[in-house]
Image (cartoon, rainbow, N blue to C red):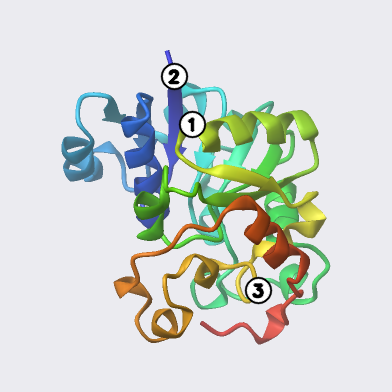
Amino acid sequence: MKRIGIVGSGSIGAAVARLAVAADYDVLIANSRGPESLTDLIDELGPRARAGEVRAAVEFGDIPVLAVPLAAYPKLPVDAFVGNTVLSTGNYYPHRDGRIEQLDSLKSTTAEYEQSLLPGTVIVKAFNNIRFQHIPNLANSSPRTALPIAGDDSEAKARVSTIVNTLGFDTVDAGKLAESWRFEPESGAYTSIYAANEDRFAVDYLADPGAPVPADRLRERLDASHRPDVAARQF
């Protein structure tokens, strides 16, 4: 039986949940507002999905998906994550998360910062460089779309890659957590690479249906990526 727990019911968490149900996973999804706030989403997802508390979602499957803002980390039951590989989908957005000196100064990437907030876990980064509306449109595309992953443990990355593959995407290993800036916001391998038209995407990203990005093209974008000036990030 395939099971996956998802912490966070926002646009990315919900999109991953939809893919998981379509791929015959049993899903337990949780958020900070409690299971009762998830009634509509669970009704949409159907009988393979249920709502629960955060701790239950972390313990539900082998690799929990964490799709919450950085500002929400202090409220997580950190002890529940210990010993787990965690698939993190998060990014640093100062307008939402507040200014974080460690990230603004480039002392660490967002993924490294997340790792410091969840000691005893193994963070693997995935699904953080693609818009939520592109996720269902590009899952199982032809040619098959690739997503970058990053992590410090090769076995953990392989396990996360298996999940991402099952959900409908190829993966490209982008290196360790220290290299995960290559697909952070403004890096050159962020959301617009999946746009059907990058100029139109810049004007109205929600209207863009997306277009497949195979692994070889994603590798080119990752190689050409640049580390952005995080301190200047305003959006």
In the image, what residue occupies the spot 67% across and 73% down? 187
The amino acid pointed to by label 1 is Thr
Distance, label 3 to label 2, CA atoms, is: 34 Å
Residue 73 higher or lower than 229, as above or below = above
Extreme residue in the top direction = 1
The disc, 3 or 1, on the residue closer to the chain's N-terminal end is 1
The disc, 3 or 2, on the residue closer to the chain's N-terminal end is 2
- SS type, badge 2: loop
Toward the viewer: 99 or 136? 136
- SS type, badge 1: helix
Foreground mark, 1 or 2, reads 1
- SS type, badge 3: loop
Distance, label 3 to label 1, CA atoms, is: 26 Å
In-image side of 160 versus 43 (left or right): right
x and y percentages locating residue 163 in the rendered image: 54, 32
Residue 218 higher or lower than 18, as above or below = below
Q: Which residue is mark 1?
A: 166
Toward the viewer: 149 or 57? 149
In the image, what residue occupies the spot 43% across and 62% down? 211
Distance, label 1 to label 2, CA atoms, is: 10 Å
In-image side of 96 versus 122 (left or right): left
Foreground mark, 3 or 2, reads 3
The amino acid pointed to by label 2 is Lys
Q: Which residue is mark 3?
A: 188
In the picture, the quarter occupied by the N terminus is: top left
Q: Quadrant of residue 27?
A: top left
The amino acid pointed to by label 3 is Gly
CB of mark 1 within 8 Å of CB of mark 2? Answer: yes
Q: Quadrant of residue 168?
A: top left
Q: Which residue is mark 2?
A: 2
